[in-house]
Amino acid sequence: MNIYLKKIDKNNYKECINSEQKRYISSNLLFLVQTAYEDDFYSLGIYNNDMMVGFILYDYDLSINGWSMSRFMIDYKYQNQGIGEKALRGTRYENWNNKCIGFGDRGSKK
């Protein structure tokens, strides 16, 4: 198992919205629009090897002066394998747009 996070962009966004889970959860499409048009919203694909298996949407929330995770999902075919835990641990070390992400301790904005 090789779990890593990758920014959602024009090369991989279709993987993110083509989910078989549409009948259980709302589409990620709205969340990708938020990422494109709202300040301080960011999206990451959760990958196992080269397969997108999940999605994270996070933002810097001024009302709490810290990071907030708006959406976290693992495709049902990949649940109960420890992927979610590894992905959450990975968020503590990612650095997008020169902002530190540390969901466990709310991080700090640089």
Image: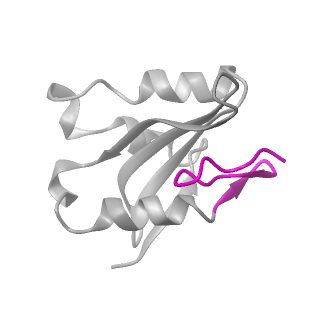
For residue 81, above or below residue 63: below
Residue lying at 40% horizontally and 77% vertically, measured from the top left: 2
Q: 85 or 52, which lies in front?
A: 85
Total marks in image: 0
Q: 75 or 81, which lies in front?
A: 81
Judge from the rendering whether residue 34 lies leftward or rightward of residue 28; answer left or right.
Answer: right
For residue 2, above or below residue 30: below
* Dominant secondary structure of the residues highlighted in magenta in the image: loop
Q: Is residue 97 magenta?
A: yes
Q: Quadrant of residue 38?
A: top right
Task: Residue lying at the far bottom in this picture: please name it.
Answer: 1
Residue lying at 78% horizontally and 47% vertically, measured from the top left: 97
Q: How is the image coloured?
A: one colour
For residue 21, above or below residue 33: below
Q: What is the x, y in percent for residue 50?
A: 42, 68
Q: What is the x, y in percent for residue 90?
A: 51, 65
Q: Quadrant of residue 39?
A: top right
Residue lying at 32% horizontally and 38% vertically, measured from the top left: 18
Q: What is the x, y in percent for residue 61?
A: 64, 28
Judge from the rendering whether residue 44 lies leftward or rightward of residue 40; answer left or right.
Answer: left
Q: 75 or 94, which lies in front?
A: 94
Residue lying at 54% horizontally and 58% vertically, measured from the top left: 91
Judge from the rendering whether residue 88 lies leftward or rightward of residue 35; answer left or right.
Answer: left
Q: Is residue 34 magenta?
A: no
Q: What is the x, y in percent for residue 60?
A: 67, 34
Q: Which residues are magenta?
A: 94-110
- In the rendered image, which quarter contains the N terminus? bottom left
